[in-house]
């Protein structure tokens, strides 16, 4: 049976316009705290997250779709537009939770189009 967990989106003021997309079975806030103690100059902030079945599979799918924006093939950091990352996350669930609401908010139709621009229904 697949595990239940979270796919999260983190930001860090020390890395402007760079976002970390990862997964965890613990709280995204706890994961951000853990990563903030690894020698980075500023703490990570949780921008948003989704709850899902099989978070590793969802994370891998999002990473594949963001591959052209990946900064380092061995790291989970992307310089993609935040709107695109949010759309890809929302594509996997109907409950994207924004922790930091200062970022762009989408209608469901906009999110679906960004996640699959080739969809015929839009």
Image: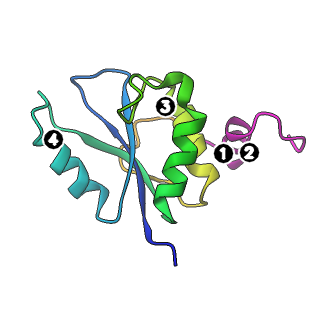
Q: Secondary structure at mark 1?
A: loop
Query: How far across and how far down the image is residue 9, in percent?
Result: 39, 43
Q: Is residue 35 left or right of residue 62?
A: left
10 Å neighbourhood of mark 1: few (<14), some, or many (≥20)?
few
Find out whether residue 111 is within the magenta segment: yes
Q: Which mark is residue 36?
A: 4
The residue under label 3 is: 82
- Residue under the point 21% across and 23% down: 14
Q: Quadrant of the C terminus?
A: top right
Magenta part of the chain: 106-122
10 Å neighbourhood of mark 3: few (<14), some, or many (≥20)?
some
Q: Secondary structure at mark 2?
A: helix
Query: How far across and how far down the image is residue 83, in percent?
Result: 55, 33
Marks 4 and 1 sit apart, C-alpha to C-alpha, by 32 Å
Compared with residue 50, is residue 35 higher up or lower down, i.e. above or below? above
10 Å neighbourhood of mark 4: few (<14), some, or many (≥20)?
some
Q: Nearer the viewer, mark 2 or mark 3?
A: 3
The residue under label 2 is: 109
Q: Is residue 34 left or right of residue 103?
A: left
Pick whichever of labels 2 and 3 is earlier in the sequence. Answer: 3
Find out whether residue 19 is within the magenta segment: no
The residue under label 1 is: 107
Q: Nearer the viewer, mark 3 or mark 4?
A: 4
Pick whichever of labels 3 and 1 is earlier in the sequence. Answer: 3
């Amino acid at each position: 049976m697949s595990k239940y967990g979270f796919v999260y989106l983190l930001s860090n003021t020390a890395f402007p316009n760079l976002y970390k997309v990862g997964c965890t079975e613990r709280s995204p806030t706890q994961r951000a705290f853990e990563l903030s103690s690894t020698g980075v100059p500023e703490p990570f902030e949780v921008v948003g997250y989704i709850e899902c079945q099989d978070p590793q599979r969802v994370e891998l799918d999002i990473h594949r779709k963001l591959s052209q924006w990946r900064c380092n093939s061995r790291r989970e950091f992307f310089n993609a537009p935040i709107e695109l990352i949010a759309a890809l996350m929302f594509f996997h669930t109907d409950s994207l939770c924004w922790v930091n609401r200062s970022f762009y908010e989408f209608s469901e139709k906009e999110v679906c189009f960004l996640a699959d621009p080739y969809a015929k229904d839009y």
